Every structure is written in C-alpha cells, then in structure tokens.
Amino acid sequence: MNELATAGLVLLAFHVVLGYTRPGLAFITGPVSALFLLYAAVVTETLDGVLLAPVLTVVTWGAIAVSGRDRETQQWYHWWAWYFLVTVALLLALVASIVVFHALGAGFILPLFFILSVVVIVAAPLIYAVISRRTMVMHVFSTIGSIMRQNLPLAMALDCAATGREDTPAFIFRRVKGWLIKGYSLTEAVRRGYAECPPRVLAMLAAGERIDQLPAALAVIERDLRANAIERRRLQPVHPFYPVVILAFAFLLILAIMTFVMPVFGAVLQEMMGGRLPVATRMLLAVTEAIFHPRDGQLHLGVLVLLVGGVVLCWLSRRRRPGKPYPHTWVIDSVKWFLPLVHWFERNRSMVQVTELLRLSLDAGCPVNEAIRGTLELDVNVCFRTRLVCWLQRVERGENIAASARRCGLGAALAWAFDSGASSGQGPQTPALAPGNPNTPAVLEMLESHYRSNYSYRVNLMRFILWPLAVVVLGAIVGFMVYAVFSPMVAVLRHLSGQIYP
C-alpha cells in the first residue's frame, strides 16, 4: 500500500468520525478533501487515490445522514446528505441499466441517454427541494395565522394540528410548540424549531411581535407568500432553468469533443495541408486545455474553479441576518445599491416593507420612534437600513419627523406621509410623540400600494425585456461553440474536394 492510499484511508476514518460528531463541518470538508485526494491521485498516477476519492465522499455523506436519524436534531445538511445518497444510488442504477442495454446491443444511443439521465437525476431532487420548501412555508404560516385569528392557545393548537401525523409540517409544529412551552417568544420558537424558515419571513414576524401586532404581521406574511406563489405560476417567456440546462449540456459535449476529437483533427490538418486549426477552434481548445489539462508546473484551473465555486456557494447560501449582517451581505447589498438599474428595485422593495410595517405600528398606537425601530428588524438592503438608523437617531433627538426623513435620504414621499403641515418639529420632541398628521397611516397605506404595484410592474417588464436578450447571448455562445467544433471538419472536406475536383 503506497503513501497516498494510506493518507486516503486516514482521511476516510477521520471524516467518518467527523460526519457523526460534527456533521455540518464534515458536509463542507468532505468533498473538498475528496477533490484534493483525487487531484493528488491524478498527478501521481495512483489508482488507489482515484478509487478512494468517491468512496470518501459517499461514506462521509452516509455518516452525516446517520447522525441525523433523530428528527428532533435534523438540520439542512442531514437532508442534503440523504438527497446526495439517493442520487448516487440512482446513478448506480442508471449505470447498471446502461450495462444491460449495452449487452442487448443498444448501440450509439447510450451516451445521449446517459447525459440526459444524469441531468434529470441531478435536477429532480433540487427542484423538488425548492418547491417543497416554498409549499412548507405557506402551510406552516397559514396554520399559525389561522390559530392566531381564532385567538386559540398557540402551543395547544399546534399540538392538535400535529396529532396523528408524522409528516414534516407536524414535525415543525411539535418543535415550535416545544420551544413555546419553554417560554420563548413566537419568533424565537420559529427560529429554533423551523430552521429552514426564510429570513425575510422571520424578520417580518419579529417586527410584528415587537410592536405587538402578530396577527397583522402573519396576515402580511400569508399575503406575500400567496402573491409569490401566484407570480411563479404565471407564464414566463423563458424558464429560469433553460439557460442552465443548455449551458451544462453544451459544456459536457464540448469538453468531450475538445478532449478526444479536436486533437485528431489538428493532426490531420497538419499532415494533409500543413495548416492549423481555425482561430475559433484554437481559442476553445486553449481554454479547455488550460482548465482541464494543464501542463507541468501550471495550476489546475479546473480544481481551483470547483473549490472556489464551492466555497462561494456555501458562503452565499448562509442565512441572512437582518440585525447583524454578514460581511458578504454588506458587499453584495452595497454593489446592488450602487448599480444604476438594480438600485431602483432594491429601494422600492425596501420601501414596500418599511411603509407596510410603519402603517401597522402606527395603527397599533406605537410611538414613531418605536415604529421606526421595528423596521430595523426587516430584511432590507443594508444601505437602506443605515438610512433608517439615521432617521431613528434624529427622531429620538427631537428633530422634525418629516425633515429628518428627508435629511437621511428616505425620499420625499415618506417624509410627506409624516408631514403635519404645522410646527410639529419646532422645539424638542419626546420620543413618544405621535406623528402630527392624523392621516399618516392612510398615506402610508397608499404609498405601500403604490410601491408594491410599481415594483411588480417593473419586475415583469424587465423580465420580458432581459430574458430575450439572455436567449440571444446564449445563442451566440452556443453558436460560437458549434462553429469552433465544425469548422475543422469543413476545412478538411474543402481540402479533399479541392483535390478531387481541381
């Protein structure tokens, strides 16, 4: 047994223990260790390392899945480990079926069948997970909202809703009920008992609980979830997965052709007519070789891209924290805030949430400063949140509410909603002072409706404008690949026809 195989077995044992004791860490480090092991095996031309790399990944997923056998302690990485294990099992079944078809003489259809089957097998669990998560959010909050509207004891009602059921919603209801019985607030109980709850929904729930308007906040959450579900059912000019599937299929096909076919055509052209491959083919071949077939001493860009992409995806998939944003949240939100077109969408989306919560707070009799403080719980753009913090500080110092909103850059419309037309801002104000304009809640409701409809209209408009442009760009990329692949064949045929018919 060589040194690489020994190191692989040590890594395997380490990740088995880590997957059982620290499954979240093992979920991230397991594939990374397998990639490094595979890279070392390819460089040293060791077969043992090549075989141990997939075994290490699968065994790590198995240890993670076993560590989450208790549903009370299951987290997202346990579910994903089960999904990956099921995918591996389906792939093995697919390979077995291909072997059977090959034994029966299926012929050339096998490669195409294999590629399409892999795409379907990988995409199906992802699509199912996304759809089930959205449906689960609607079901959970519809139940909680119905209980709150009927003024029933929440913990007891959730226990009754879960009685006689063993599905995922019943499991979530039991966990939330357990945290409620321990004395936690509804927001904290949902955060602990429903780990997959979207951060935007959780932020609205926390803001509604802060101003003692949970039924109204739950009604807003239900309405937004229902509107998003209706929006997803509408006919779209291009399905979002269409460019991804096309690029993935074209990438696999081009990779195979550039690896096995183009070098042969290059040798043929060099031998027959002393020429080189066309420019487009050389460009595509150079990119393929640089990524997947580096020379000695060069960095393996394919492994680097996979590692960096995996780290970035894991980092970006972290749940947002409205109260304490992550550093990458600051970077992403700042970039979106200062982009010319995206800025408008970020600001309008934030204004929809802020005006909605301000109206609910003022209708409940909250002072202005407490209403503004409640908006800091919302999941809005961090640059817009700094303006809300500025507004809150100025109002609590006793400045005029409308004038401070203008000075902090929140817009003339929001300032107009709080403008009393009198000297409400002259002299020091107490934080508990209500807005001078008695029509402020009605104006905020009108502004909320305006921002919501305007945002929805612009989103649909940009979708119907940008998707055709994306299809054109996608067609240009695929067309370049097709030209780079078939132009050497045309050159060979043209040279041969010139020799036959002078």
Image (cartoon, grey):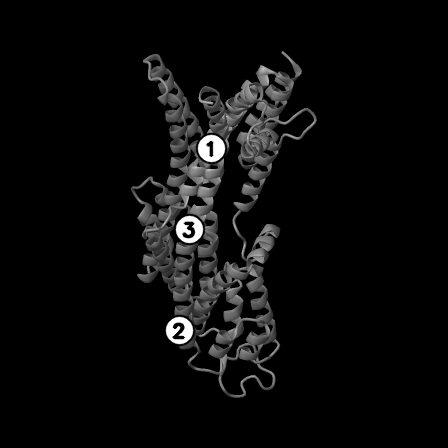
Horizontally, is 219 left or right of 262 in the view? left
Q: Amino acid at mark 1?
A: Ala
Q: Please, what secondary structure does the residue beneath circle 2 have?
A: helix
Q: To which quarter of the image does residue 302 belong?
A: top right
Tell me the residue that label 1 is attached to: 81
Query: Cα distance, mark 3 to mark 2?
Result: 32 Å
Using the image as rendered, state which of residue 448 and residue 106 is in the foreground: 106
Q: Please, what secondary structure does the residue beneath circle 3 have?
A: helix
Using the image as rendered, state which of residue 370 and residue 119 is in the foreground: 119
**Label pair 1/3, CB-CB below 8 angstroms:** no
Query: Cα distance, mark 1 to mark 2?
Result: 47 Å
Comparing labels 1 and 2, the label whose residue is closer to the camera: 2
Comparing labels 3 and 2, the label whose residue is closer to the camera: 3
Identify the residue at horizontal 32%, vertical 58% (top origin): 146
Tell me the residue that label 2 is attached to: 446
Using the image as rendered, state which of residue 422 and residue 209 is in the foreground: 422
Dot 1 or dot 3, earlier in sequence? 1
Q: Is 215 above or below relative to 167?
A: below
Q: To which quarter of the image does residue 124 belong?
A: top left
Q: Amino acid at mark 3?
A: Trp
- Category of crowding for the residue at label 1, using alpha-carbon neighbours closer than 10 angstroms: few (below 14), some (14–19), many (at least 20): many
Identify the residue at horizontal 53%, vertical 52% (top origin): 320
The single residue placed furthest to the right in the displayed view is 297
Tell me the residue that label 3 is attached to: 467
**How far across and how far down the image is residue 201, in percent?**
44, 55
